Amino acid sequence: MTLDPRTFTVKTSEAVAAAMQAAASAGHNELTSHHVLSELVKQNDTMVLPLLAKVGVSVAQVVDKCTTVLGKLPTVKGNPEPRLTRELAAAFAAAGELQAEFRDEYLSVEVLAVSMHDIIGVPRDEMVAALREVRGSHRVTSQHPEDQFHALEKYSVDLTALARAGKIDPVIGRDEEIRRVVQVLSRRPRTIRF
């Protein structure tokens, strides 16, 4: 698979660009998977954080692993242009295969994170299963998939979660009020005026 940035989502492009910048500012002449993964977990509005939570890995664990490895990399003076390592190229190739498996049109951050499962410390099959649960049946068909995935959380209220947390009024003892509301709502549409 060839690495084509045109097939990246916006968040994937941002993460890779931030990783390049971080590698250059640290004086690293190679861009590794650890650079990219540390930038992926910094993005709050993507599916990476729910994915990590699903497999039981904290962001702090991933950041610690990446920081430890990046601290041991050799540095060069000047302004180096970081090159992709073979490890990162293999991660992008694995992400491309997973992208094809999910029938996505663009390479998303969560698919890229799954391809780095060895750094995260979780088997690939477990990561893929967690991604299927977190993502559901959604496919990445645009460069802004986060808008599709988080639409319910943005524009609705989870009444079940609020009820479990005890943050809404109980319905017990309000039978007559509920009966009246159902009666009004079940009338013919022409009699209800807004």
Image (cartoon, helix red, strand yellow):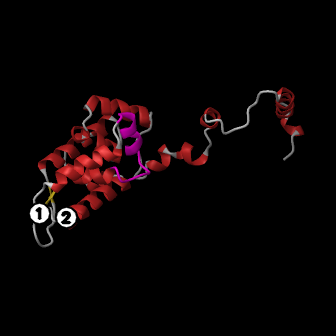
Q: Nearest the camera: 47 or 103?
A: 47
Using a 10 Å C-alpha cutoff, classify the residue at mark 1 as few (fewer than 14 neighbours), some (14 to 19) or many (20 or more): some
The image shows residue 39, relative to residue 157, as above or below, that is below
The residue that appears at 34% across and 45% down in the rendered structure is 59
Would you name the residue on which mark 2 appears? 26
- Where's residue 176, x and y in %? 87, 28
The residue that appears at 61% across and 38% down in the rendered structure is 158
Q: Nearest the camera: 87 or 100?
A: 87
| 8 falls in the magenta region | no
Task: Determine whether, in the image, residue 121 is placed left or right of residue 193.
Answer: left
- Where's residue 185, x and y in %? 82, 34
**How many angstroms separate mark 1 from mark 2 (CA)?**
7 Å
The residue that appears at 10% across and 59% down in the rendered structure is 74
Image quadrant containing the N terminus: top left
The reply to whether callout 1 and callout 2 are in contact (CB within 8 Å) is yes
Q: Nearest the camera: 79 or 173?
A: 173
- Where's residue 112, x and y in %? 29, 45
| 54 falls in the magenta region | yes
- Where's residue 154, x and y in %? 56, 48
Instruction: Assign a secondary structure to mark 1.
Output: loop
Q: Nearest the camera: 6 or 159?
A: 159
Kind of residue at disc 2: Ala
Kind of residue at disc 1: Thr
Q: What is the quadrant of residue 57 in the picture?
A: top left
The magenta span reads 41-56
Residue farthest to the right, as pictured: 191
Task: Determine whether, in the image, residue 178 is placed left or right of residue 165.
Answer: right
The image shows residue 83, relative to residue 62, as above or below, that is below
Q: Which mark is residue 75?
A: 1
